[in-house]
């Protein structure tokens, strides 16, 4: 199994000089994203905020549509929330990266209506690989840990999307000045 710990020789993750100030809401990277998009009625609607260094926070309210067992959040949904939170670290580094590998520890059951306080940080960079970790706490940022994850993101070029995404959505994204502006925030040229 490939490790999610930065290898010897990994560098610390660099906060881009133009990264939004700590406390700033990052906004959605794509309106139809299941994790953060406002145009996705069944999505998680996560709003991620920049932290210090290469770190972010977010709050996720578990709704009845997120159930796995009666009254409890589905583990896959919680993993998605962690994935999205770690994925948004790219905003602070000005890189586009996709999840390559992700591992979740489910520590406590998470009831419907819980506000999960999520935090994520980059733990190292090695070539195109960005190592990250995240946790979700119940009831507040000092509350008990319910979920924990580590993930490896791989830096990609914009062609990762334009070559592989369904044409209909790619054309719409390229015709949307807001989307182009957001892609430029990642220093890519769509
Ligand atoms: C106009 C259109 C604009 C659109 C864009 C606009 C905005 C977008 C901006 C940001 C979007 C991104 C994220 C935002 C936040 C969202 C969070 C959710 C993120 C996701 O939900 S995203 C979906 C799920 N994700 C995928 O859909 C990936 C599918 N996959 C692939 O596309 C390839 O698989 C890829 C690219 C991952 C690698 O392929 P590749 O050919 O580029 O690279 P290669 O294989 O050479 O690997 C290089 C080094 O990574 C190591 N490595 C690779 N894979 C590994 C693994 N699984 N485990 C451990 N190590 C791994 C190798 O071992 C090597 O390591 P080493 O260098 O040490 O040898």
Image (spheres, helix red, strand yellow):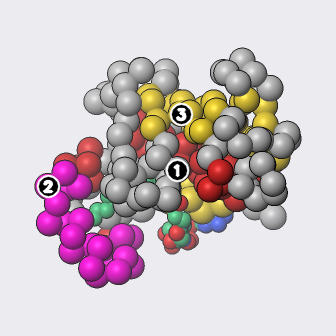
Helix or strand or loop: what does disc 1 sit on?
loop
Q: Which mark is residue 58?
A: 3
Q: Quadrant of residue 21?
A: top left
Q: Earlier in the sequence, mark 2 or mark 1?
A: 1
Question: How far is mark 3 from mark 1, CA to CA?
Answer: 11 Å
Q: Earlier in the sequence, mark 3 or mark 1?
A: 1
Q: Is residue 134 visible?
A: no
Q: Which mark is residue 44?
A: 1
Question: How far is mark 2 from mark 3, CA to CA?
Answer: 26 Å
| Label 2 Cα crowd, 10 Å radius (few <14 / some 14-19 / many 20+) | few
In the image, is residue 49 above or below residue 166? above
Considering depth in this image, is 32 or 42 the residue closer to the camera?
42
Q: Earlier in the sequence, mark 2 or mark 3?
A: 3
Q: Disc 2 vs disc 1: Cβ atoms closer than 8 Å?
A: no
x, y (%) of residue 131?
61, 46
| Left or right of residue 80, residue 48 in this image | left
Which residue appears at 17% of the width and 60% of the height? 176
In the image, is residue 139 above or below residue 4? above
In the image, is residue 107 above or below residue 174? above
Which residue appears at 39% of the width and 52% of the height? 37
Helix or strand or loop: what does disc 3 sit on?
strand
Q: Which mark is residue 177?
A: 2
Which residue appears at 64% of the width and 33% of the height? 115
């Amino acid at each position: 199994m490939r490790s999610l710990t930065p290898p010897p020789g990994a560098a610390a993750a660099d906060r881009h000089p133009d990264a939004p100030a700590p406390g700033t809401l990052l906004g959605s990277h794509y309106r139809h994203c299941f994790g953060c998009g406002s145009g996705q009625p069944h999505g998680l609607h996560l709003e991620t905020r920049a932290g210090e260094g290469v770190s972010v926070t977010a709050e996720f309210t578990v709704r009845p549509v997120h159930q796995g067992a009666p009254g409890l959040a589905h583990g896959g949904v919680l993993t998605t929330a962690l994935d999205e939170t770690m994925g948004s670290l790219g905003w602070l580094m000005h890189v586009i990266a996709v999840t390559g590998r992700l591992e979740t520890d489910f520590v406590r059951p998470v009831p419907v209506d819980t506000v999960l306080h999520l935090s994520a940080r980059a733990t190292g960079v090695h070539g195109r690989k960005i190592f990250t970790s995240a946790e979700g706490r119940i009831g507040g940022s000092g509350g008990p840990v319910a979920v924990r994850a580590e993930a490896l993101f791989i830096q990609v070029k914009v062609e990762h999307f334009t070559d592989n995404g369904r044409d209909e959505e790619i054309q719409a994204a390229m015709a949307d000045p807001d989307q182009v502006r957001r892609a430029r925030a990642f220093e890519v040229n769509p």
